[in-house]
Image (cartoon, rainbow, N blue to C red):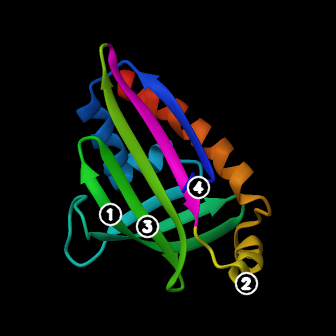
Amino acid sequence: MQPDAHAQIDVAAPADRVYALVSDLPGLATLSEEFQRGSWLGGVTEAKVGARFRGANRRGVRWWSTVSTVTDAEPTRFAFDVRSLGLPVSRWQYDIEPTATGCRVTESTWDRRPAWYRPITILATGVSDRSTQNQRNIERTLARLKQAAEA
């Protein structure tokens, strides 16, 4: 299934540095448009498959919380499934492919909200066109990731 939004960028930095940035919750929060902070749940202290984290998200004056489960945690992919109020919301994925000059990073997201739940999330987040908003967010996040990894 194709993602609802995605983009890629070439980064002149080692793939392991990029993976460290996207798989570290405080690091990811400095890069992201909406994800403001996260905390690992259940005594976990780092990304690993099955680990869960609570995310605090913000857009303008609106704040909302989610719980995510890490599905992939390897040097070439960091991914997690997001739930809100126990319902599936989205999947976020960072694919990291080594290149001769560093790596190519592809960020993708899939909207997994049930149709009946979408109007509720529109009220909560203030976003009526989630795919377009996520496309913009991804492009901004990747630009920040490039800058941080290459610094």
Residue 36, image x, y percentages: 51, 57
Calculate the distance from the C-alpha at mark 2 to the C-alpha at mark 3: 19 Å
Q: Amino acid at mark 1?
A: Thr
Tally of numbered discs:
4
Calculate the distance from the C-alpha at mark 1 to the C-alpha at mark 3: 7 Å
Q: Earlier in the sequence, mark 1 or mark 4?
A: 4
Q: Quadrant of residue 143?
A: top right
- Count neighbours of disc 1 (C-alpha within 10 A) and say few if under 14, some if 14 to 19, many if 20 or more: many
Does residue 125 lie above or below 96 as drawn? below
Q: Earlier in the sequence, mark 2 or mark 1?
A: 1
Farthest residue, direction top:
101
- Count neighbours of disc 2 (C-alpha within 10 A) and say few if under 14, some if 14 to 19, many if 20 or more: few
Q: Which residue is mark 4?
A: 34
Q: Nearer the viewer, mark 3 or mark 4?
A: 3
Magenta residue span? 101-111
Q: Earlier in the sequence, mark 2 or mark 3?
A: 3
